[in-house]
Amino acid sequence: MTTRYPLLPSLRLATGITIGALFSYRVISAVYRLYFHPLAKYPGPKLWAISRIPWAWHLIRGDLWQVLGRFHEKYGTTVRIAPDELTTISPTAWTDIYVTKPLLPKDPHSQTPPLNGAHSLFTAPDNTHKRIRTTLVNGFSDKALREQAPIIEAHANNLVSRLHREAARAAPGGSIDIQKLFGYATFDIVTDLSFGESVRGLEDDNEHAEITAFFFHAKFGTIRNCLSRFSPLDILLGLFLLSISRKARERNWRLTTEKIDRRLSKGDMTGVRSDFMTPVIGRIDESGTKGITKKEVVTNGLAFVIADCQLTTVALATSTYLLLRDRPKWEQLTKEIRGRFSSHEEITVHSSQGLPYLEAVINETLRLHHPTPISLPRSVPPEGRVIDGEHIPGNTVIGINLQNIQNDPSLWEEPRVFHPERFLPATDERYDGRFDKDVRAAYVPFSTGPRNCLGARVFLAQARVILAKLVWSFDLKMGSVGDDWLDQKAYLVFEPKPLPVKILPRQDTVA
Ligand code: HEM
């Protein structure tokens, strides 16, 4: 009998051989990765050592930071979390990974390529980074901050006025989402500092859908970067999302370019105002060898807006939540602020510095719930690198997870409890000796080295002034908030949950 499909048996055989070969390859590769790979000696969950998929799964779920925290508690200081990746919480690794020259480059899979081809500081490779940072850095110095202070203070005053209006409008006993208003305040401040004009969210009672878009952008970027390890999935996702967001992106780009153009056309405004664009004036150079190109100014302006708006908002909302959940801490801060100032206008960028409890609250907030609870992954060159006294093999990705190094019980006393007191000077009567055990070298929330945070000073200025004015002006009470508020998903940054609070004008003597 003749068959109608004479090739079928050989097709089946070929399929069987292919599946068999693939299976054998997987098994051999798993055995190699587990027992013979240069990273085989590092502890960690076996499945993660064999495949990237568990890591990717948790990154996409937004709970990687929690899972890695549990791994460090179980496996120790340095843990293998993928066939080619280690995470460490060793405080001495800060210098080895982020400061020692030649600098380890950022892991390319952790970077979203710039859509307009011009790099921000976050994504720029070595020499481009140096050139752009040299141009922009003077906009973030102590001197620049002193000159920018009136802008920050004016918007912080607008927040106080807006909260008074909101309180008057709210139903008796009603709450407002203060997290949203922190977003508006930081958006106003950073657009003023980046573009020379604020979006006037607070004054005009505007609503800002852009802020939600920033968080969506962070989520999309995280997922795209994750999928870049499984190429071409990243390209497909990129094409799909880029095609549906094309119009919005073109509009944003056009609007941002127009704003930057308006600011640049005003030139050097020394004596009138100072902002992040001040050092850029006269230094635009399209050669790409010195100064900064116009497109890079726009990309970096947008990057400042997004970084400030997201991170400062998350930090302010977290401080407020932690203080209201632990009333004695709120009262301690109130005592310090109300004892120091006799009107909220007296609270300035300058006068709010060096208040011990306020500083301690901000530090403890960043320690307990770092707004960007990610690893800062770097690529080890082929010849390897000594990190924390150990030779790390070439082509390994290694990073410190900002959240976990600040929350590991081997480094901190009661790490998951809000204790601003741990950051008070040891001479302060409120300091408690049990925090001597804390390994303070582990706390580096703005990273270190040439790629550390450019905006740390401006963040701290905003946080001090806004928290101090808030505490001076109002008696806040927590609205209906679950105990799991800190249990947030993270895509590059924590996705903030609404924070309903009741806002009551302060009852004691107000000037
Ligand atoms: C709570 C507030 C903030 C925290 C915890 C924070 C933290 C960090 C960290 C850890 C890095 C290093 C990233 C890496 O190595 O990949 C960084 C970089 C950076 N941050 Fe921040 N940041 C904060 C606020 C801000 C603000 C308000 C701005 C701007 C207005 C800003 C601008 C930048 C820039 C431009 C970089 C890149 C610097 C470079 O590579 O040269 N940050 N930040």
Image: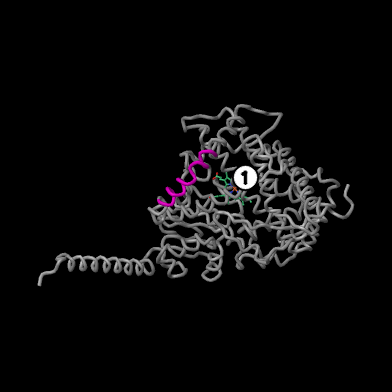
In this figure, what is the number of numbered marks?
1
Write down the quadrant of residue 9 in the picture: bottom left
The answer to which of 416 and 327 lies nearer the viewer is 327
- Between 346 and 266, the one lying in front of the other is 266
Visual colour scheme: one colour
Q: Which residue is mark 1?
A: 455
Q: Is residue 469 above or below residue 432?
A: above
Q: Quadrant of the N terminus?
A: bottom left
Instruction: Check disc 1 and report its element: helix, strand or loop.
Output: loop
Magenta part of the chain: 236-251
Frontmost residue, 354 versus 8: 8
Mark 1 CB lies closer than 8 A to ligand 1: yes
Tell me where residue 405 appears, x and y as whole percent: 58, 61
Q: Amino acid at mark 1?
A: Gly
What main secondary structure does the magenta stretch of the protein show?
A: helix
Is 420 left or right of 252, judged from the image as shown?
A: right
Q: Position of residue 339 (x, y in %)?
A: 85, 52
Estimate how packed mark 1 is, as few (under 14), some (14 to 19) or many (20 or more) residues with alpha carbons within 10 Å: some
Q: Is residue 250 magenta?
A: yes
Q: Is residue 473 left or right of residue 123?
A: right
Q: Is residue 357 left or right of residue 41?
A: right
Horizontal and vertical percent for residue 11? 20, 65
Residue 355's place in the image compared with 21, above or below, is above
Residue 249 included in the magenta stretch of the image: yes
